[in-house]
């Protein structure tokens, strides 16, 4: 018997969820975040951020950082399997 495809049924498809998360990691819907700024001048890991000076956060680079992800350029949905 074929069951209806409902939200609850899709929620049970764990591998589909892992695929979705992996696609969002590799192709973030917002690759760059603009207009971020610090409220006061700070130094983080040797980088100086002046107060109220806008800077860009490159989300795509964060999502393929080899120090944070194994095989960062590969599509591996199982990386999200707890």
Image: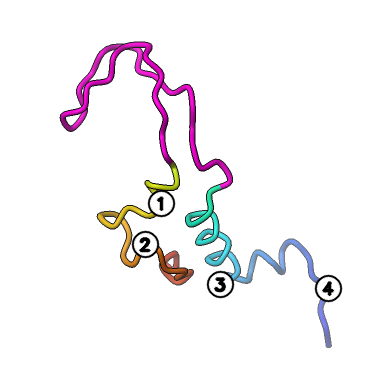
Sequence-first tag of 1 and 3: 3
Asked whether residue 70 is drawn in magenta, I would say no
Picture coordinates of residue 21 (x, y %)?
Answer: 53, 59
Sequence-first tag of 3 and 2: 3
Sequence-first tag of 4 and 2: 4
The reply to whether the C-beta atoms of the residues labelled 2 and 1 are less than 8 Å apart is: yes
- Quadrant of residue 2 within the rendered picture: bottom right
The vertical placement of 61 against 78, above or below, is: above
Q: Is residue 19 left or right of residue 8?
A: left
Specify the label residue 4 is tagged with: 4
C-alpha separation, residue under disc 4 versus residue under disc 2: 36 Å
Specify the label residue 63 is tagged with: 1
Residue found at the far left of this picture: 46
**Residue that carries the numbered disc 3 in the rendered image:** 15
Residue at the spot x=38%, y=55% of the render? 64
Q: Which residues are magenta?
A: 29-58
C-alpha separation, residue under disc 1 versus residue under disc 4: 35 Å
The vertical placement of 32 against 63, above or below, is: above
C-alpha separation, residue under disc 1 versus residue under disc 3: 20 Å
**Residue that carries the numbered disc 2 in the rendered image:** 72
- Quadrant of residue 82 within the rendered picture: bottom left
Under circle 4, the secondary element is loop
Closer mark to the observer between disc 1 and disc 3: 1
Under circle 3, the secondary element is helix
Sequence-first tag of 4 and 3: 4
């Amino acid at each position: 018997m074929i069951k209806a495809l409902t939200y609850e049924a899709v929620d049970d498809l764990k591998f589909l969820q892992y695929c979705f998360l992996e696609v969002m990691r590799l192709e973030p819907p917002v690759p760059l975040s603009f207009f971020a700024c610090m409220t006061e001048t700070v130094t983080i890991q040797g980088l100086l951020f002046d107060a109220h000076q806008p800077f860009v956060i490159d989300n795509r680079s964060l999502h393929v950082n080899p120090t944070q992800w194994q095989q960062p350029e590969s599509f591996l949905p199982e990386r999200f399997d707890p």
